[in-house]
Amino acid sequence: MSGWDDKPQIIGFKQQRPTVAKGSALNSAQRAGLVVSSESKGAGQHKGPADHQRIAKLDRDDAPKPPEKVDVSVGKAVATARMAIKNAEGKSMTQKELATSVNAQPAAIADLEAGRAVPDQQLLTKIERKLNVKLRGAKNTIGGPLHPPKK
């Protein structure tokens, strides 16, 4: 029954879908009665690659600047002044003893001496008074006496 003159069937062949019309083409097609649908199929399902370079640039530009750390000279001044203070047995003051006397954590004193601490004005003031050493101000005055002798 099947002959050479019959129309061949193509496997996997789909019928043509109606084209999506926009703008003035949509209006003229509607007047002519040709348009079946006016919305695009799968709108909003962009499956292309993400724009990673643009996103990375935004990440680099918007990153907050890390807070400034205390200068190393402040840490050295605290360490030398702390070591200069001796107790009744002749031993120098430890970081833990300094921390308890200024009501702070021992880790805060360690970070301050290492230059890793964020400047805390209250803590610096307490340490200045306890050690009688200037820790704030001009770089050439850091490490000097808190109240120098009057001239």
Image: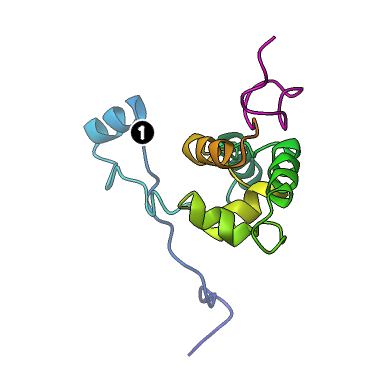
User: Was residue 146 drawn as part of the magenta stretch in this picture?
Assistant: yes
- Label 1 environment density (alpha carbons within 10 Å; few <14, some 14–19, many ≥20): few
Task: Classify residue 4 as left or right of residue 78.
Answer: left
- Seen as rendered, the residue at the extreme top is 151
- Residue 124 showing in the rendered view: yes
Give the quadrant of residue 55: top right
Q: Percent position (x, y) of residue 78?
A: 68, 43
- Residue 49 showing in the rendered view: no
Report the front residue among 75 and 145: 145
**Residue appearing at x 51%, y 41% in the figure:** 123
Whether 27 is drawn above or below 83: the answer is above
- Seen as rendered, the residue at the extreme front is 88
Residue ID for mark 1: 22
Range of residues picked out in magenta:
135-151
Whether 32 is drawn above or below 53: the answer is above
Whether 85 is drawn above or below 12: the answer is above
User: Was residue 136 drawn as part of the magenta stretch in this picture?
Assistant: yes
Mark 1: secondary structure: loop
**Residue appearing at x 22%, y 31% in the figure:** 31
Give the quadrant of residue 22: top left
What amino acid is at disc 1?
A: Lys
Magenta region's main secondary structure?
A: loop
